[in-house]
Image (tube, rainbow, N blue to C red):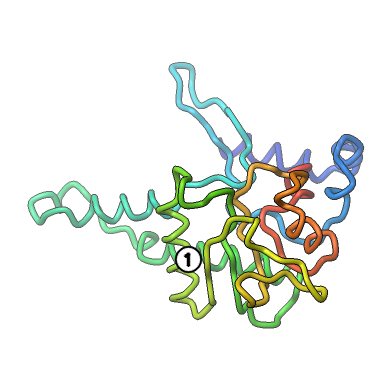
């Protein structure tokens, strides 16, 4: 698995590959603003012949849910302590996730503080991963970052900024599957991204690559 991921990432960095990828991508994906995709994942399925790569997913979900499940397994009852070795990584995993988003912010903006995040998906309350959206919202808030969950129709492009509920948005955690923001309902987000006025992760460029 590690060797496969390393090989893919070497190829994805090649100038010839990048030129081919951008040649088939729409105009909105051409600009590289910095972000790589905070929750990009390589989806391997374990089969009889070994692991097989099923998908490269630029906005994979489930990380926080699985972290919570792992902690629950460790603390279910004292009688099971023998089965679960202590794992310090679980204790720091939420910080690791936050740091991934902070790194996306810094790749595009540098060192100014990250003030606000909006988690965006179509009809987010109806989504299968809606509980995880709420977990991410709380994670950002615990880190001192204002956070909310929104349908893209709630966003407004005005005065060179993206707004949600009359508050400017610094970073959008993008859960949409309209990867190039082509749908009319996503126009405000598309305009803000095209102007470089918001940090979007994952963004159209990362998806094209």
Query: Which picture quadrant has residue 67?
Result: bottom left
In the displayed structure, 199 sits above or below 77; it is below
> Which residue is depicted at the point 85% across and 42% down?
14
Query: Which picture quadrant has residue 34?
Result: bottom right
- The quarter of the picture where the N terminus appears is top right
Q: Dot 1: few (<14), some (14–19), or many (≥20) neighbours within 10 Å?
A: some
Residue 160: give x, y in percent of width and height.
Answer: 82, 73
Residue 74: give x, y in percent of width and height.
Answer: 23, 54
67 or 174: nearer the viewer: 174
21 or 180: nearer the viewer: 180
Q: Going by the image, does 22 lie left or right of 172? A: right
Q: Going by the image, does 68 lie left or right of 175? A: left
Query: Which picture quadrant has residue 41?
Result: top right
Q: What element carries label 1?
A: helix
Residue sticking out furthest to the left: 79
Residue 92: give x, y in percent of width and height.
Answer: 41, 66
In the displayed structure, 44 sits above or below 69; it is above
> Which residue is depicted at the point 76% across and 67% down?
157
- The quarter of the picture where the C terminus appears is top right
Residue marked by disc 1: 137
> Which residue is depicted at the point 70% across and 82% down?
112
């Amino acid at each position: 698995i590690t060797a496969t991921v390393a090989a893919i990432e070497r190829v994805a960095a090649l100038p010839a590959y990048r030129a081919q990828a951008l040649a088939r991508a729409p105009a909105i994906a051409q600009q590289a603003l910095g972000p790589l995709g905070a929750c990009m994942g390589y989806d391997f399925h374990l089969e009889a012949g070994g692991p097989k790569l099923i998908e490269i997913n630029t906005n994979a979900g489930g990380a926080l849910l699985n972290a919570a499940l792992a902690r629950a397994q460790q603390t279910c009852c004292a009688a099971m302590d023998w089965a679960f070795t202590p794992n310090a990584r679980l204790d720091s995993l939420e910080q690791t996730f936050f740091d991934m988003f902070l790194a996306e912010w810094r790749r595009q903006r540098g060192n100014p503080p990250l003030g606000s995040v909006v988690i965006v998906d179509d009809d987010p309350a109806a989504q299968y991963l809606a509980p995880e959206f709420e977990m991410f919202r709380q994670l950002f808030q615990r880190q001192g970052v204002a956070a909310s969950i929104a349908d893209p129709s709630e966003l407004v492009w005005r005065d060179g900024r993206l707004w949600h509920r009359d508050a400017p948005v610094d970073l959008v955690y993008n859960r949409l599957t309209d990867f190039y923001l082509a749908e009319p309902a996503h126009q405000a987000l598309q305009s803000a991204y095209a102007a470089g006025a918001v940090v979007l992760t994952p963004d159209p460029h990362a998806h094209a690559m």
